Amino acid sequence: MNAHVIQASVSTDYGSALPPLNKMTRCLVLPLMFGGSAVLGLSSAQAATSNVEQVTIYQGSASVTRALPITGNGEQTVVFSCLSPHMDKESLSVQVQAVGNVNVGEISIEELTGEQAAQCQYQGDAKVQTQQNTLANINAELEAARLAKAYLQNLTKATQVNTDSTIANNARDIETQATSINQRILEIQQRQARAQDALNQLMSGSATSTFNNVTQVSVRTASRSPSNIKLHYQVRGAGWEPAYQARLNTTSEQLSITASAIIAQQTGENWTNVPVTLSTVNPNQSTTGQLPYVQRLSLYEENQDANVRRESPMMDAAPVMMAEAAYTKGAGVSMAPLPNFTVSSQNKNGIIEYRLPQLVSIPSDGRRVRTVIGEQSGSSKLWIRSTPSVETAAYWYASAPFLTPDWVDGSLQLYRDDNYVGQSRYSYQMLKEQGIGFGSDPNMMVKELTNEDKQGEKGVLNRTQTITTTNAYQFTNQHNRSVRLQVLGSEPISRDDSLKVTVTNTPPVTERDWNDNQGIVAWEFDLPSKQSQVIRSTSQVSYPANKMLAGNQ
């Protein structure tokens, strides 16, 4: 059964003056003093369904805008029914805006339970509504056929015939008509059974979540002409997260990254063919920064407890709300233009909004709806990176100079030469600094040659002692082409003037303090096909003999 929003109007003539209601927007939330039947009891009641004009989805919540027409004139009560039970009703987030010369009065919010809530269960499910209409038409046909059969039966009893020929002719006519009606009733009953089965299957697998209650908002209005009224409210139980796919072609050195949004909601409302905007803002995070801690110091006096207290400066409490846990015509006919799914984005001082160009259907059952929100691609620089002191392996890496900081962090699926190689994390800053890893490279052989420590002897006359560490690794390129190899290593860092560190690298390092990481060094060179390269590093640490060496390794 379809649940409708009721717009009840009272045919009262106020003359040229409208009732003294506050105009345009009201945010007062008042409890209803009457049940849903009281609204239905108003005269000149008309049924209307509110349309969702806009949905903006955040992390854990959403802003919804609905619209209802105001027909007629005078004072009337407009009712938005079958709304989410998770609507934020305690704050002033429920707002009403009237379009045109309309006065807006009090706003009332109530919870509906039982049968009234059950009627809202399948509102907005287009397939269920279509099947319900089909079944209703079949039931009407069946009722008409049964009425025709009953009429024929009554006519037969009331008809008096006088001759044998007339009796025979009437009997044959009645038999023919009765047979036709019975066959029609049987055929309609079979269609009715099939339609009922189809409806039951749709309802059992419907995308609509069932709730024990729903929210209804009633708005008192006064107008002289038809207009529209909009309801803005916040609802919990919705959210979205970004997901990325990176595809690297190692032959052409082309890289493309596709950004998608995974949307899900369990608000209790089915959003069917609605405009959707995705916002990167998180309404659940703190909205104010903290002030610095100030120490209150005092001197300790005998027989008196110390009065050292930690006092936090007064600050506005940040409200925190916990969030509750996707045309083709025949030949010779002009083709209709294909829909454009290009997402427009806007950066509002760090808050990025993605406006989807197409209408989206997001059922309230928690299913994940995925839609593409952007793509960036271009030429990439490729290299193979190894950190042999940690792991004797090498990995493919690619730069992405075309990336922009508009995308927020999210999961990243990686494809190298059309093969799925794993999953990582998309972070603009990290990817710009370190590149994107695309899995291990079995064609780069890494072999450890030397890893030894030697400690100098301490004698009576020796005032210093030394520790010498040597590491050597061999890299062999088994590719059929030359590759760029990057090897990362480390050098000890002295934090004491009496502790001396000397490091010898063969070949010399290409970069020290790699990517502003103190102590990390990098070698970069082109390694020809089927060739090998050895990297050797020797460090010597000297310190006073009467001291002990402390470090983090």
Image: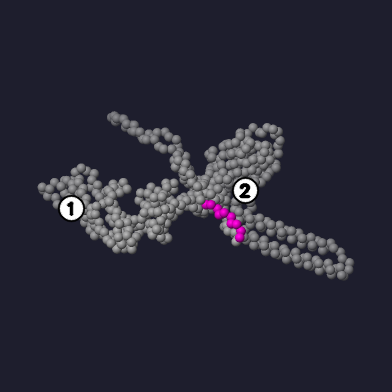
Residue in the image at 29% along x and 47% along y: 513
Q: Which residue in the protein does label 2 denote?
A: 116
Residue in the image at 16% along x and 52% along y: 456
**Across the whole image, how many numbered discs are drawn on residues?**
2
Which region is colored magenta?
332-341
Residue in the image at 48% along x and 44% along y: 346
Whether the magenta-drawn stretch holds residue 335 is answered as yes
Image disc number at residue 455: 1
Predominant secondary structure in magenta?
A: loop
Q: Is residue 364 visible?
A: no
Residue type of the residue flagged with mark 2: Gln
Q: In the picture provided, is 335 more to the left or to the right than 444?
A: right
Res 206 → quadrant:
bottom right
Q: Earlier in the sequence, mark 1 or mark 2?
A: 2
Q: Nearer the viewer, residue 496 or 393?
A: 393
Q: In the picture provided, is 195 more to the left or to the right than 355?
A: right
Rendering coords of residue 361 (x, y %): 55, 52
Residue in the image at 35% along x and 51% along y: 434
Rendering coords of residue 159 (x, y %): 85, 63
Question: Do residues under tags 1 and 2 come within 8 Å of each other at their CB atoms?
Answer: no
Instruction: Specify the farthest residue to the front.
Output: 332
Rendering coords of residue 244 (x, y %): 44, 53
Q: In the picture provided, is 120 more to the left or to the right than 505?
A: right
Residue type of the residue flagged with mark 1: Gln
Label 2 residue SS: helix
> Against 304, is 536 above or below?
below
